Image: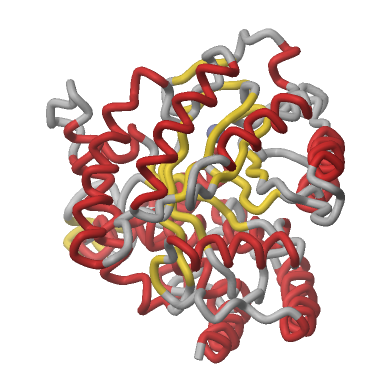
Amino acid sequence: MLRKVVLAGLAATAVDAFTAPTGFFGTRQAPAAKINSVKPVSARTQRVNGAASLRAAEATKNKLPASVKPGVVTGQALVDLLKYAKENNFAIPGVNIVGSNSINACMEAAAKYGGPIMVTFSKGGGQFIAGKSLPNKNDEASIAGCIAGALHVRAVAKQYGIPVVLHTDHCQKAWLPWIDGLMAANEDYYKTHGEPLFSSHMLDLSEEPLEENVEICKKYLERMAKCNVLLEMELGVTGGEEDGVDNTGVDSARLYTQPEEVWYTYQELSKVPNGHFTIAASFGNVHGVYAPGNVDLKPVILHNTQKYISEKLGGKDKKPVNFVFHGGSGSSLEDIRYAIEAGVIKMNIDTDTQWAFWDGVRGYEAKYHDYLQGQIGNPEGATKPNKKYYDPRMMLRAGEEAMAKRLIQAAEDLNCVNVL
Ligand SMILES: [Zn+2]
């Protein structure tokens, strides 16, 4: 069932996302120089398709767990999915979204690359979904917006035929009321549906001392475990700036997590009954995109940490920790793949898809500039109406298409192509 969808998705990839321009871009000839911001990626397509057939062969060897079905994945199915990712050396794209356009672009991309996706709400993204005019003093808009976005995903995810993980991004200590609100929603949803509304939440207490970080995470994990929500926590600090949190000036030693810190955390969180967690350990990663040479990524830290903890646990499981990779934008493919080999099962993507969405809109405006200067009148005549050009769906769709295309590239980087 799932497999069929994947193959159909890949066929669609070759036809509409790459070879033939879709929608509005295809209807009119535009100056090539102006639209090549949305580049046809034929060389990469071939590599994607090559990688896809390779993955298909491998995937048959190691089958997708039966618990993982199209739609939102929570609880044991999520645990199975992450295990499957780790065993098959791929990571799931975790993408920050800001509304139904970026949410749908995520699912469109996942259907085309044939893999799971993690739709990720930030506190600011949730507020944006609820509406920027709303008061948000007690995070009420952020909570309502995240819930609305999650329900949107739940309403349509199955139609895309892919497993979707509903996740939230960084939550520092002062923002915990936001997660409290979402946990209340999870508990409510659990009562009716036997599963939580969200699959997982991230807590980022990395600014606090290690003991306090782990203590708060443990307390939350106890609550989460009761309704099958998975916890993502952060050790060390991801540098750079994201969603209003500025870590650009942080002491560089904190950008590299020590294996002992991960081991301590692993032991403490493993004590929680039914507690499932992933760890964002810093290894020099930085939010945002910087000129080459400014980021010193050391994924070997993750390898060393797995080895250290594996030995502590008796050596049977070589990769006991589920790592997640923040601040991956602009990283080399070598670093990304090496991190995946160390048990990274998800990489966050935000900056690159923000650019892609904008670039799609930019390309649309550049192509139809002369049709977008007034409601009436364009190069075809002074009385010609422009309604079909300035309909907001046209530029938003251009953004969606560009974002989905960028995500297919991300999935290729993460070995996440045709893994269902
Ligand atoms: Zn992050």
By what rule are the colours in the image chosen?
secondary structure
Residue at 65 percent of width and 37 percent of height? 266
Residue 361: in sight, yes or no? no
x%, y% of residue 54?
80, 78
x%, y% of residue 122?
39, 37
Say which of 331 and 269 sits in front: 269
Q: Residue furthest left?
A: 134
Residue 23: in sight, yes or no? yes
Say which of 234 and 226 sits in front: 226
Q: In the picture, residue 130 is in which quadrant?
A: top left
The answer to whether residue 111 is left or right of residue 332 is left
Residue at 57 percent of width and 16 percent of height? 247
x%, y% of residue 273?
48, 48
The answer to whether residue 382 is left or right of residue 415 is left
The answer to whether residue 359 is left or right of residue 47 is left
Residue at 17 percent of width and 53 percent of height? 375
Give the vertical position of 125 relative to 137 (above or below): below
x%, y% of residue 365?
40, 50
